[in-house]
Image (spheres, rainbow, N blue to C red):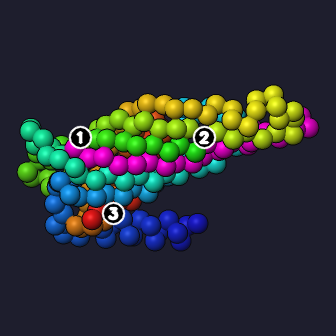
């Protein structure tokens, strides 16, 4: 564990010290985020499985007041396991959504920074299993359509590679991870 942490910190240090030459998010740009999240509004008790998510944004059109509107998708997964007196219950959450965002690219001195905010329409697929009577909640416990908002920032260390952090409703309240830009 200690060796892995040292390798990770060394990698981050090298990336931070490298000369960056990234361009701002613009029309035609595609960015893909892969992250791990913490915190959730989905509920559940007991042991939480780490939230993972994958999202993509593609710059569709430039708008006034320097910025670009993107459209893209989102998929995320998390779950819970609760063991009570003589029984076990499990919840599995998958959210699939379509999202749109406004990317502000007016920072001339910081072309490596991508600040964005937007909205998502998604479908929350919930599966519930228990040693108890499964018909109590049913197999589609809590599934349904939802609308949410999000805001985030990306920092690019090169033309193609960066990191991101995002807050908002998904499988977790805070996501962070890596970004690839094409």
Q: Is residue 137 left or right of residue 14?
A: right
> Which residue is labeled 1 in the image?
102
Residue situated in front as seen by the camera: 19 or 82: 82
Badge 2: how crowded within 10 Å, few (<14), some, or many (20+)? some
Query: Which residues make up the magenta segment?
Result: 69-93
Q: Is residue 42 left or right of residue 26?
A: right
Residue at 30 percent across and 46 percent down: it is 71
Residue at 87 percent across and 33 percent down: it is 133
CA gap, disc 1 to disc 3? 18 Å
Q: Is residue 136 left or right of residue 127?
A: right
Q: Whole-percent x and y of residue 101? A: 28, 41
Q: Which mark is residue 180?
A: 3
Q: Whole-percent x and y of residue 131? A: 87, 40
Badge 3: how crowded within 10 Å, few (<14), some, or many (20+)? some
Secondary structure of residue under mark 2: strand
User: Can residue 85 be found in the magenta stretch?
Assistant: yes
Q: Earlier in the sequence, mark 2 or mark 3?
A: 2
The C terminus lies in quadrant? bottom left
Residue 144 visible in the displayed image: yes
Q: Are marks 1 and 3 in contact (CB under 8 Å)?
A: no
CA gap, disc 2 to disc 3? 27 Å
> Which residue is labeled 2 in the image?
125
Q: Is residue 70 left or right of residue 45?
A: left
Residue at 37 percent across and 53 percent down: it is 56
Residue situated in front as seen by the camera: 152 or 77: 77
Q: Earlier in the sequence, mark 1 or mark 2?
A: 1
The N terminus lies in quadrant? bottom right
Q: Whole-percent x and y of residue 110? A: 14, 53
* Farthest top residue in view: 136
CA gap, disc 1 to disc 2? 27 Å
Q: Whole-percent x and y of residue 109? A: 9, 52
Badge 1: how crowded within 10 Å, few (<14), some, or many (20+)? many
């Amino acid at each position: 564990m200690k060796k892995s942490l040292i390798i990770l910190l060394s990698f981050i240090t090298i990336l931070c010290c490298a000369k960056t030459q990234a361009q701002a998010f613009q029309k035609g740009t595609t960015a893909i985020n892969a992250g791990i999240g913490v915190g959730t509004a989905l509920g559940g008790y007991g042991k939480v499985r780490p939230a993972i998510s994958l999202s993509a944004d593609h710059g569709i059109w430039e708008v006034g007041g320097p910025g670009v509107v993107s459209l893209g998708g989102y998929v995320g997964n998390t779950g819970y396991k609760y063991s009570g007196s003589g029984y076990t219950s499990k919840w599995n959450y998958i959210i699939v959504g379509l999202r749109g965002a406004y990317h502000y690219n007016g920072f001339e001195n910081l072309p490596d920074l991508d600040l964005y905010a937007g909205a998502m329409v998604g479908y929350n697929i919930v599966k519930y299993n228990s040693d108890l009577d499964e018909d109590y909640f049913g197999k589609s416990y809590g599934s349904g359509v939802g609308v949410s908002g999000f805001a985030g920032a990306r920092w690019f260390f090169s033309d193609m590679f960066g990191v991101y952090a995002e807050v908002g409703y998904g499988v977790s309240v805070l996501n962070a991870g890596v970004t690839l830009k094409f």
